[in-house]
Image (cartoon, rainbow, N blue to C red):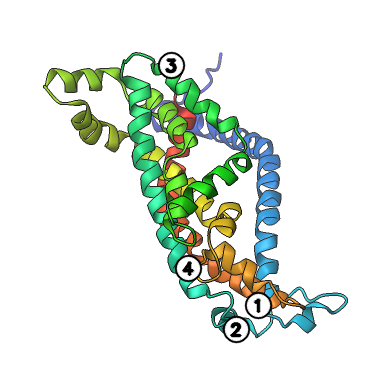
Amino acid sequence: MTMSPVRTGHGAQHATSDSRAPRRKSRAGRQMAARWPSYVVLVITAIAFIAPFYYTIVIASRSNAQMNQVPPPLIPGGELWSNFAAAWNTPQANIPKALVNSLMVSTTVTVGTVFFGTLAGFAFAKLRFTGRNALFGFTIGTMMIPPTLGVIPLYILMANLHWTDQLQSVILPTVVTAFGVFFMRQALVEALPDELVEAGRVDGASAFRIFWSIVLPIARPAMAVLAMLTFMTSWNDFFWPIIALTSNNPTVQVALNNLGGGYVPDHSIIMAGTLLCTLPLIVIFLFLGRQIVGGIMQGAVKG
């Protein structure tokens, strides 16, 4: 009676690894097959978002006559820098001053919204005081009021303060927002353990010291997300600045509106000015991109 050979030692391990290799390959293949529709959707979405920006570059690098051809060109031309210079030097737009003004307004509004939104969000999330829920409900309720309803009384107030055509007229109305308070309150409810707040109180720290030493480091990812959203909103704001400011002291949206004026608007120069006014947003995103993704991922894995 013959006995079948028994594999021991390295031979058995080699046989086991050989048998597991096809399983790993098949599992990886199934995972890739399950993921490819997601990749297709992501690629299509990316193209849909990049295409308008690309065509803006095409228009900004061509002349107005070239863009009126049929069919219009789809490849960037060689007039980008000359159109940049024309938009930059257009007197009625005053883009250099508009960029400085928008940077001042957006930065001030962002710092105020993030700081006061985090401070109020911490109070609503972790502090106990009379009327907390009612006050928070009132704050959220203001988000349902259309901004257009407050334009006339707000303009009358700014006129009485002699702030028309001054930057404080577009800074102070938005330096604290209900959305910022709500956003930071929801973030701190999840991210800030009650035990840390209680530990700070046991150590004798005041509420503001707890906020400064404990809350701010924990809230940093959410603050970065709120800062990016606030900066973009303030930078792109058109409705109130076009009412409160003039071409003598414009923000970028007012300047672009003036750049598009005239009997025959030059779309190439308008798009070149639009690109110039978009560059600060791209720079801000490059600096805060990692914090923004980290804040979004932190909120996604909570619970």
**Of callouts 2 and 1, which one flags the residue occurring earlier in the amino acid sequence?**
2
Picture quarter with the N terminus: top right
Type of amino acid under label 3: Asn
Asked if disc 2 and disc 1 are in contact, CB closer than 8 Å, the reply is yes
Mark 2: secondary structure: helix
Q: Residue at x 69, y 56 (%)?
A: 47
Type of amino acid under label 2: Ala
Q: Answer few, some or many: residues within 10 Å of disc 2's Cα (few below 14, many 20 plus, some between 14 and 19).
A: some
Q: Which mark is residue 99?
A: 4
Type of amino acid under label 1: Ile
Q: Which mark is residue 133?
A: 3
Q: Is residue 128 left or right of residue 243?
A: left
Vertical relation: 181 (above or below) 113: above
Q: Answer few, some or many: residues within 10 Å of disc 3's Cα (few below 14, many 20 plus, some between 14 and 19).
A: few
**Of callouts 4 and 2, which one flags the residue occurring earlier in the amino acid sequence?**
2
* Residue ID for mark 1: 269
Q: Residue furthest left?
A: 204
Q: Quadrant of residue 19?
A: top right
Picture quarter with the C terminus: top left
Cα–Cα gap, marks 1 and 4: 16 Å
Residue 252 location (% of width, % of height): 54, 65
Q: Answer few, some or many: residues within 10 Å of disc 1's Cα (few below 14, many 20 plus, some between 14 and 19).
A: many
The reply to whether residue 87 is visible in this rendering is yes
**Of callouts 3 and 1, which one flags the residue occurring earlier in the amino acid sequence?**
3
Cα–Cα gap, marks 4 and 2: 16 Å
Residue 34 location (% of width, % of height): 67, 35
* Residue ID for mark 2: 86
**Of callouts 4 and 3, which one flags the residue occurring earlier in the amino acid sequence?**
4
Cα–Cα gap, marks 3 and 1: 52 Å
